[in-house]
Amino acid sequence: MLGVIKSEQSTPKVRAKMPAKTAKKPPLPADDETVEIAELGESLGFLLRIAQLRAFEAFFDELSALGLRPGEFTALWLVLRNPGMKQGAIARSLCIKPAHMTKLVDRLVTAGLIERVASPEDRRAVHLSLTPEGETFAAARKDDFLALHQAERGNLSEAEFSDLTRLLKKYSGLD
Amino acid sequence: MLGVIKSEQSTPKVRAKMPAKTAKKPPLPADDETVEIAELGESLGFLLRIAQLRAFEAFFDELSALGLRPGEFTALWLVLRNPGMKQGAIARSLCIKPAHMTKLVDRLVTAGLIERVASPEDRRAVHLSLTPEGETFAAARKDDFLALHQAERGNLSEAEFSDLTRLLKKYSGLD
DNA sequence: AGGATAAAGTTTCCATGGAAACTAAATTGG
DNA sequence: CCAATTTAGTTTCCATGGAAACTTTATCCT
């Protein structure tokens, strides 16, 4: 792991303190702000991260008023479309870890939107379904959900958006 | 009204405890595990999240041996390509918040890979550049970086990968 | 000038999500 | 059948990254 450590014993902060005004210019680039992304422009990991930040912005612009975070909204939607499914199955299909799923479901239950139903056939398991309030909520918010999809599209054309989702699904193995 | 236990005063957990084996089946879907993704398949936010999980897997498969996390590796690369750039400019181009950037740079400095240089012209600012060790490290790891890009491609063809990166760049406003 | 405002980094604190250990129930296999 | 293993979900703890407040320096404005 390349043990190249010459740091002072604590984390070394280097901002110029009072007693200095003499220092030679290190070779500074001409422009002070323009950063060359270089190979990162071909790095899928990087591009996906940036794109996700945009998508989050779109989400909060559209749906922050609902008081639900993206994960909660997504889970709610999946329960709406798959009533009675086991909590673990929902979690797996969203790539949410069990520990996280427990807390996420807790919040939705506390919000009165979904309910846990003990499984009659497996006493460890729990089935999820919407409460009547959850049904009402989902029905009322369906338009917001569609509006979100519009907003998420951002500057992409319909065709580009469709290409993008298709490629992402293939890449993620969701086809 | 099924065996739906209304919230106890704390977070309501509903798993069947010992004293029950009688309960009527709620309307369960035929398959116990197959979840219908439904409209989520068109949700960019969701697809991006899943895709990013894949990309992270690829990263750790390829580069976990280096002892650097994705963000650190990315930042290192950007400093390599933009030596002497101000810390804040690097952070902005990576969409990393200042607070996070401070800690990330701390780690890279402690690892001996980059160094902070006090700016001669702005005493608040800090310029970043690679240490000699950092240069050596980056040069030695260039092949790993390229291998990562191959691994990141996953099941996509060259053309699909190129489409995908192009669309992501457009969506993120990086063109 | 020189006070007000903005900007660069840092620190502290908090929210989110994962890892590991745990409980209870189901399954397996001898 | 019953011990061993596996599975569903929960709990506790920890790592990561953001928000807000702060310090220091630069810039702006009459």
Image (cartoon, coloured by chain):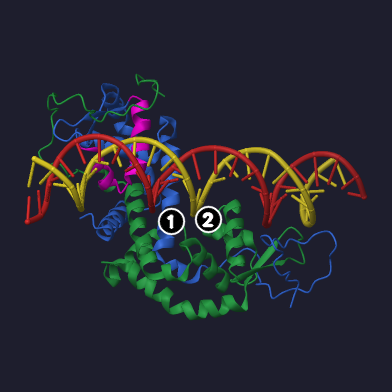
Chain colours: A green, B blue, C yellow, D red
- Please identify the quarter of the rendering in which residue D26 is found: top left
| Vertical position of residue B146 compared to residue A141: above or below | above
What kind of element bears circle 2?
loop
Label 1 to label 2: alpha-carbon separation? 9 Å
- The picture places residue B148, in percent across and down from the top left corner, at 36, 40
**Main SS type for the magenta part?**
helix
Instruction: Residue under label 1, please give it.
Output: B49
Quadrant (top left, top right, bottom left, bottom right) of the N terminus of chain B: bottom right
- The picture places residue B157, in percent across and down from the top left corner, at 34, 53
- Please identify the quarter of the rendering in which residue A88 is found: bottom right
What kind of element bears circle 1?
helix
Q: Is residue B94 left or right of residue A29?
A: right
At label 2, which amino acid type do we have? Cys
Instruction: Residue under label 2, please give it.
Output: A95
Please give the name of the residue rendered at 62% of the width and 66% of the height, measured from the top-left corner: A109
At label 1, which amino acid type do we have? Arg
Residue A59 can be seen in this image? yes
Q: Chain of mark 2?
A: A
Say yes or no: labels 1 and 2 on the same chain: no
- Please identify the quarter of the rendering in which residue A22 is found: top left
Q: Which residues make up the magenta segment?
A: B85-112
Please give the name of the residue rendered at 78% of the width and 74% of the height, measured from the top-left corner: B24
Count of labels shown? 2
Instruction: Tell me the number on the disc at residue A22.
Output: none
Contact check, label 1 and label 2, Cβ < 8 Å:
yes
Residue B157 can be seen in this image? no
Q: Chain of mark 1?
A: B
Quadrant (top left, top right, bottom left, bottom right) of the C terminus of chain B: bottom left
Q: Is residue B31 left or right of residue B144?
A: right
